[in-house]
Image (spheres, grey):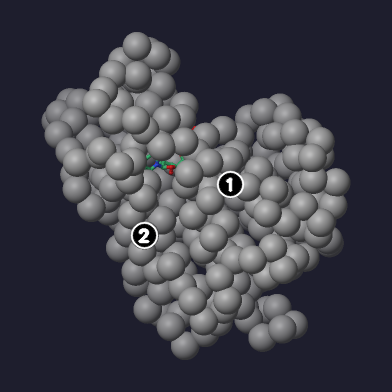
């Protein structure tokens, strides 16, 4: 697998924590010789820490940390325009940035929370995809690349109190499916990986920083770690070109 990743350029959104950070580390562990990682998120200082961590064990990996808020279309445009030459020919986009704000019945959800979830989880993911696809299509080797979207079980099985988050992840699922069909005749692979419960900052963000409430979500289940999902992402990117993990649900063993 490492051979197939050799020399590749991988762009990851939401790489400052949780699954996205794990994905960056896992790519570097799998191909420590010759790989280029563009790690993005809003917290640039945290991204620089991630870059430092990778530099500590994967000397052949070049890391380019970039401050990028995917909910801001102008930031996405300048991100692509300003990619340094050696990171310009992108091979893989991991659309991972996402969040959930609050737990509330649908009529009570604040309009700002609705906007932030859709702008990040849906429009951000679509805008990133639209920005990177022309790079795939213009490649001198005939137009190829991988779009790997991180969805959620919530996009398949909506739960009470999470209507907007669930709707965003259902939208991701629908968009991913359509895109895969539109690109069926090309060498571009469109991949969706849907995690079940993973212990990250995600739940803390949902409960606006309340760590006690965040922890309660995992009662009765040993949640996955970000690394568990990262292994699947890197596995998907490392398959030979004819193999696509189109739609994969990853659960902890005891999640219903
Ligand atoms: P984390 O909160 O740990 O990570 C979320 C990441 O997204 C952070 O790096 C954050 O970085 C980034 N992010 C949030 N908003 C933006 C934005 N507007 N622009 C750019 N980056 C942003 O949670 P997870 O790692 O768990 O979440 C990663 C993905 O996995 C999400 O899409 C989530 O929906 C999905 N998921 C998570 C599950 C779980 O149980 N944890 C289950 C199923 C799916 P920063 O704040 O620096 O911008």
Seen at 36% across and 59% down, the residue is 248
- Is ligand 1 within 8 Å of the beta carbon of the residue shown at mark 1? no
Relative placement, left or right, of 186 versus 31 is left
Mark 2 and mark 1 in contact? Answer it, CB < 8 Å: no
Q: Which residue is mark 1?
A: 23
Mark 2 nearby-residue class (10 Å; few <14, some 14–19, many ≥20): some
Residue 237 placement (x, y as % from top left)? 57, 64
Residue 231 placement (x, y as % from top left)? 53, 51
Relative placement, left or right, of 16 versus 218 is right
Q: Secondary structure at mark 2?
A: strand
Residue toward you, 187 or 136 = 187
Relative placement, left or right, of 75 versus 230 is right
Q: Which residue is mark 2?
A: 248
Q: Where 216 sits versus 246, above or below?
A: above
Whichever of labels 2 and 1 marks the residue nearer the N terminus, that label is 1
Q: Secondary structure at mark 1?
A: helix
Residue 210 placement (x, y as % from top left)? 37, 13
Seen at 18% across and 31% down, the residue is 161
Q: Quadrant of residue 6?
A: bottom right
């Amino acid at each position: 697998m490492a051979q197939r990743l050799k020399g590749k350029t991988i762009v990851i959104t939401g790489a400052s924590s949780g699954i996205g950070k794990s994905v960056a580390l896992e790519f570097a562990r799998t191909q420590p010789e010759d790989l280029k990682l563009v790690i993005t998120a809003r917290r640039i200082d945290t991204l620089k820490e991630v870059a430092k961590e990778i530099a500590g064990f994967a000397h052949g990996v070049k890391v380019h940390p970039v401050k990028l808020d995917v909910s801001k279309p102008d930031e996405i445009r300048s991100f692509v325009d300003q990619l340094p030459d050696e990171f310009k020919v992108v091979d893989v986009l991991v659309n991972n940035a996402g969040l959930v704000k609050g737990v509330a019945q649908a009529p009570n959800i604040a309009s700002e929370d609705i906007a932030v979830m859709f702008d990040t989880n849906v429009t951000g993911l679509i805008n990133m995809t639209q920005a990177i696809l022309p790079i795939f299509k213009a490649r001198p080797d005939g137009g190829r690349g991988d779009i790997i979207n991180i969805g959620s079980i919530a996009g398949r099985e909506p739960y009470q109190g999470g209507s907007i988050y669930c709707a965003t992840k259902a939208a991701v699922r629908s968009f991913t499916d359509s895109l895969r069909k539109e690109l069926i005749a090309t060498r571009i692979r469109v991949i969706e990986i849907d995690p079940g419960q993973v212990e990250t900052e995600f739940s803390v963000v949902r409960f606006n920083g309340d760590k006690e409430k965040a922890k309660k979500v995992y009662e009765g289940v040993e949640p996955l770690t970000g690394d568990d999902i990262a292994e699947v992402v890197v596995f998907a990117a490392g398959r030979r070109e004819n193999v696509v993990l189109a739609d994969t649900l990853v659960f902890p063993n005891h999640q219903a």
